Image: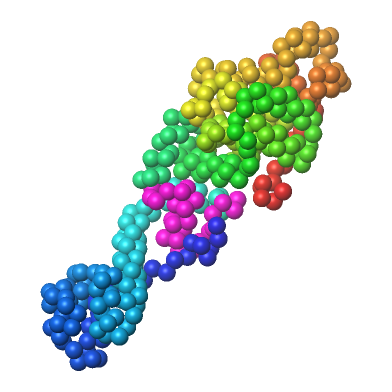
Amino acid sequence: MNNEQNIKFIPDYLVAPGEVLAEYLDDLGMTQAELADRTGLTKKTINEIIKAKAPITPETALKLERTLGRPAHFWSNLERHYQDDLTRLAEQRRMASYLEWLKRVPVSAMAKLGWIPKLKDTFEQLDAVLCYYGVASPAQWQTVWSEYQVAYRQTARFEGCAEAVSAWLRQGELQAQRIECAPFDRKRFLEVLEHVRTLTTAPPHVFRPKLVSLCASAGAAVVFVPELPKTGTWGATRWLGDRAVIQLSLRYKSDDHLWFTFFHEAGHILKHGRKTVIIEGNGLDDEKEREADAFARDRLIPPAEMRRLVKADSMSAADIKTFAAEIGIAPGIVLGRLQHDGIIPYKTGLNSLKMFYRWKRADDE
């Protein structure tokens, strides 16, 4: 979407086709009554056209062509443009009531990420935002958002903003639609997860395209969408047609958070049906969240291997690295699990085992 696509000329006045017709009659010295006689239209119809109380129909346009010498499409185009402009002016008046809603949309942040253009004209900006959401008005936006609202649980430290969260979700939809996906295949997806687990030791420029490609082969679109202000989201799972969508916000940039979130969302896909929408935040600890947590936890570090690690005599950096290499995952994931379980404190020099990513926009990579 660019500026040219969103700049539309909307006149602040209207020229009705009847005004043009009246000028033609003046130039020809023809009265409305004479025109009625020549066209076979009633005097009332001619008068109503001139006063913009009646439209120029295709049949009338053809009669005017034969009578006045201007082609029918000239009169039809006058009427069409007049009706379009009339509709646009009425819409602009309606849009004036939408401006309060626009103030709640994180326009600057979205423009900075390249999701929408930043426009000087307020009405053009509103139009660009509505086009981005794919809705005709804030009322339709509310209808669409209400489908997701119950699934959204915000982080306690952030003031929730429905417009920002829905913008983030919308970007995920748009990116997911651009990914070529096979129809979802549960068996294939389980196989893919085994391959994905081996990618945890790779840097982003290696694992990211492989992760997207592998999951797409099983019917799951993985999209990386930066977090917007006031959202507090780090992941989401939903279905678009026959494909599952895993959306990651990259809010937490360490490898343990990233991979646990991915496998957590994969757990939702496998366990909670196609009608379920999950938008992750630091909210309710419900049964579905516990099931997804358990799936991610055990997929990354099998329970038997975790018990073996906990029984070890020491947990130095070297020990953690050795264990991680033995089970084929990144050391930071092991450390993150030990910290989460309270075995190792979060404030520790061992955090150097984790990989911390500096993500770029997907379009820039």
- Tell me which residue sits at (48%, 56%) in the image: 128
Q: Tell me if residue 225 can be seen.
A: no
**What's the magenta region?**
112-138
Tell which of 8 and 353 is nearer to you.
8
Residue 283 in the image: x percent, y percent?
51, 25
Residue 173 part of the magenta-drawn span: no
Q: Tell me if residue 110 can be seen.
A: yes
Above or below, 318 against 208 in this view is above
Which of the 4 image quadrants contains residue 304?
Answer: top right
Above or below, 102 against 269 in this view is below
Q: Is residue 47 left or right of residue 334?
A: left
Q: Is residue 124 left or right of residue 81?
A: right
Residue 91 in the image: x percent, y percent?
33, 59
Residue 128 part of the magenta-drawn span: yes
- Tell me which residue sits at (13%, 75%) in the image: 42
Tell which of 76 and 143 is nearer to you.
76
Above or below, 206 against 17 in this view is above
Residue 122 in the image: x percent, y percent?
43, 60
Image coloring type: rainbow
Quarter of the picture holding the N terminus: bottom right
Tell which of 5 and 75 is nearer to you.
75
- Tell me which residue sits at (56%, 20%) in the image: 271
- Tell me which residue sits at (57%, 24%) in the image: 268
Q: Is residue 307 left or right of residue 265?
A: right
Which of the 4 image quadrants contains residue 76?
Answer: bottom left
Above or below, 332 against 308 in this view is below
Tell which of 44 and 50 is nearer to you.
44
Residue 14 in the image: x percent, y percent?
30, 73
Which of the 4 image quadrants contains residue 252?
Answer: top right
Label total for image: 0
